Image (cartoon, rainbow, N blue to C red):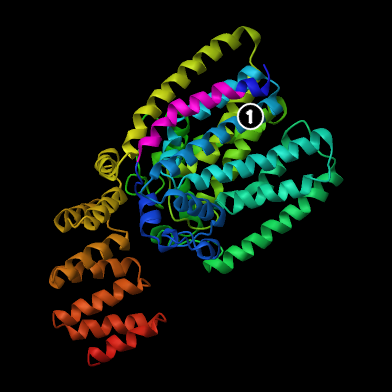
């Protein structure tokens, strides 16, 4: 079976599993970005899309932003099918490209086709394809796999005149679409050391050096645009953790990470505290995570010589997960289904690598079992896609799927508030705080809602608690000061102002003067 013939079944599985996204509206992050960001309104602000942050909280994804801008220019948010059709096309392209890579590395058509079909049907990918903003992951995947393909061709056929330009182009596509795209050099190191076909050391250095220099240059530009190396505002409760706390937190995420890759029966739009634990103490859940990491390490060592593609798959999983794990820098999210998209490519490599080495008597039963699993994955994806069809359906399902995640209730409250349902928003914000009270964002949202309704007496203690969690939150401090003045407590208002000035927030001198102190 040729690589081209293998691609058709994989493409078909991808279309069947995700095709219902074409009936969807713009939901959640996509609606926030494309409906409320002035850069995407006609006429499109192309310069702003290229030179400013992707989100108000940071990040720089100029290729993703430009592609979304082009789709907005073609039909605007009133025609969401344009966005969804683009996402589906990119998803099919990623799935087909993965199959071709797996076949090139394993030489086994059946194992490559089965692993590619499992990937194409995987339910954890629904968020990436249905949410529109998941185009960032899809573009980054094309860039990373494109770089891996260029390296493979150079190792197989020799370095040509086009090798370096193609490799640099793949790096630009990956890194300027999604932050995880910066890891291409690390992936190629694993590819060079683990897979049988290797470039001569001199050639590897010759084409690898400009790649590394490009990554450094792009990181510097990104730092200038976003104002920080990390490029985004980290979650306050992660930013306050030390290295040990972040390591323990990462171990707590690993069991859910692995479950979603292996058995994605239950899916949800938000993951986080208190369902996912932050920092110490080290619990049984963390121990399970540690054991899974050790199992992966043992598998890597065992397969490094015997099943190199499976070992490289583990390498790919780890390297693509690290930027979002908070182990390097505190991140803006603990876990999300979209963040598993790039690691799931590595999981497909593990499946293809192990499948290619199965004894002949086991191959047919294994293929049958994997086809049944593909069918089950496809059905689960088809059932999951309609959750993303409308905002109402999404937010109704969100708190049902993730009742123990504070952020599920918080973002549902934000949605209710945007629809003018202040009563519903207050209820949702209060419930969010009742299950986990360590996010100043929720304190600020509820406090602001109460303040606007003239209920500063209720708002003051809520905003005070939020400021204890994150003293540097300027907007929260300002509104707390306003409320304290409204209730006649000028002494506390002055104290709030002095505390702000003490940490460098000189703008609170005005509040101090108004408090008469």
Q: Residue at x 36, y 84 (%)?
A: 507
For the residue carrying disc 1, how many other residues have a C-alpha within 10 Å: few (<14), some (14-19), or many (20+)? many
Q: Residue at x 47, y 55 (%)?
A: 331
Q: How many marks?
A: 1
Assign the C terminus to one quadrant of the image.
Answer: bottom left
Is 185 located above or below residue 38 in the figure? above
Residue 150 in the image, given as x and y percentages of width and height:
73, 40
Is 172 located above or below residue 315 in the figure? below
Extent of the magenta region: 7-24
Which of the pair 96/375 is nearer the observer?
Answer: 96
Which of the pair 510/18 is nearer the observer?
Answer: 18
- Determine whether the residue tagged by mark 1 lies in a helix, strand or loop: helix
Q: Residue 210 appears in which quarter of the rendering? A: bottom right
Question: In this view of the protein, can residue 337 be seen by the observer?
Answer: no
Looking at the image, residue 224 sits to the left or right of residue 469; the answer is right
Is 389 located above or below residue 324 in the figure? above
Q: Residue 36 appears in which quarter of the rendering? A: bottom left
On the image, numbered disc 1 is attached to which residue? 310
Residue 340 in the image, given as x and y percentages of width and height:
49, 40
Name the main secondary structure of what is drawn in magenta. Answer: helix
Q: Residue at x 59, y 54 (%)?
A: 176
Residue 14 in the magenta stretch? The answer is yes
Question: In this view of the protein, can residue 49 be seen by the observer?
Answer: yes
Q: Residue at x 42, y 38 (%)?
A: 256
Which of the pair 175/258 is nearer the observer?
Answer: 175
Assign the N terminus to one quadrant of the image.
Answer: top right
Residue 30 in the image, given as x and y percentages of width and height:
39, 50
Residue 340 in the magenta stretch? The answer is no
Is 358 located above or below residue 278 in the figure? above
Residue 272 in the image, given as x and y percentages of width and height:
36, 48
């Amino acid at each position: 079976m040729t690589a081209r013939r293998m691609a058709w079944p994989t493409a078909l599985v991808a279309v069947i599993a995700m095709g219902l996204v074409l009936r969807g509206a713009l939901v959640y992050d996509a609606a926030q970005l494309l409906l409320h960001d002035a850069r995407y309104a006609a006429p499109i602000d192309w310069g702003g899309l290229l030179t400013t942050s992707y989100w108000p909280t940071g990040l720089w994804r100029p290729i993703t932003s430009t592609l979304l801008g082009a789709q907005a220019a073609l039909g605007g948010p009133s025609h969401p099918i344009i966005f969804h059709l683009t996402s589906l096309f990119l998803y099919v392209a990623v799935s087909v490209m993965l199959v071709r890579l797996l076949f090139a590395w394993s030489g086994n058509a059946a194992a490559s086709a089965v692993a590619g079909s499992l990937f194409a049907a995987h339910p954890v990918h629904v968020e990436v394809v249905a949410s529109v903003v998941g185009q960032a992951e899809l573009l980054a995947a094309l860039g990373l796999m494109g770089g891996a393909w260029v390296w493979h061709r150079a190792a197989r056929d020799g370095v040509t005149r086009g090798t370096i330009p193609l490799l640099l182009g793949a790096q630009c596509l990956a890194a300027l679409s999604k932050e995880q795209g910066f890891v291409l050099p690390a992936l190629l190191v694993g590819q060079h050391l683990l897979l049988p076909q290797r470039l001569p050391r001199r050639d590897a250095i010759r084409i690898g050096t400009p790649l590394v220099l490009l990554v450094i240059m792009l990181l510097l530009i990104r730092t200038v645009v976003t104002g920080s190396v990390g490029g985004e505002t980290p979650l306050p409760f992660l930013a306050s953790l030390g290295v040990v706390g972040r390591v323990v937190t990462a171990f707590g995420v690993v069991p859910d990470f692995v479950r979603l890759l292996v058995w994605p029966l239950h899916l949800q739009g938000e993951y986080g505290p208190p369902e996912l634990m932050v920092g110490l103490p080290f619990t049984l859940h963390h121990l399970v995570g540690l054991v899974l990491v050790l199992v992966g390490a043992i598998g890597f060592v065992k397969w490094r010589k015997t099943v190199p593609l499976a070992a490289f798959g583990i390498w790919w999983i780890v390297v693509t997960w690290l930027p979002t794990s908070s182990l390097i820098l505190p991140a803006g999210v603990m876990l999300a289904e979209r963040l598993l998209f790039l690691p799931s490519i590595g999981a497909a490599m593990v499946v293809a690598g192990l499948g290619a080495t199965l004894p002949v008597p086991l191959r047919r039963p294994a293929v049958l079992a994997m086809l049944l699993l593909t069918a089950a994955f496809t059905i689960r994806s088809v059932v999951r896609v309609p959750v993303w069809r409308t905002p109402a359906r999404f937010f109704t399902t969100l708190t049902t799927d993730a009742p123990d995640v504070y952020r599920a209730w918080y973002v549902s409250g934000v949605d209710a508030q945007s629809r003018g349902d202040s009563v519903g928003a207050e209820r949702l914000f209060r419930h969010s705080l009742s299950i986990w009270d360590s996010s100043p964002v929720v304190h600020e949202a509820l406090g602001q809602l109460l303040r606007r309704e003239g209920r500063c007496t209720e708002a003051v203690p809520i905003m005070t608690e939020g400021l204890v969690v994150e003293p540097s939150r300027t907007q929260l401090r300002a509104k707390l000061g306003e409320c304290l003045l409204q209730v006649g407590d000028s002494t506390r208002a002055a104290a709030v102002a002095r505390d702000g000035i003490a940490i460098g927030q000189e703008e609170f001198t005005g509040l101090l003067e108004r408090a008469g102190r």
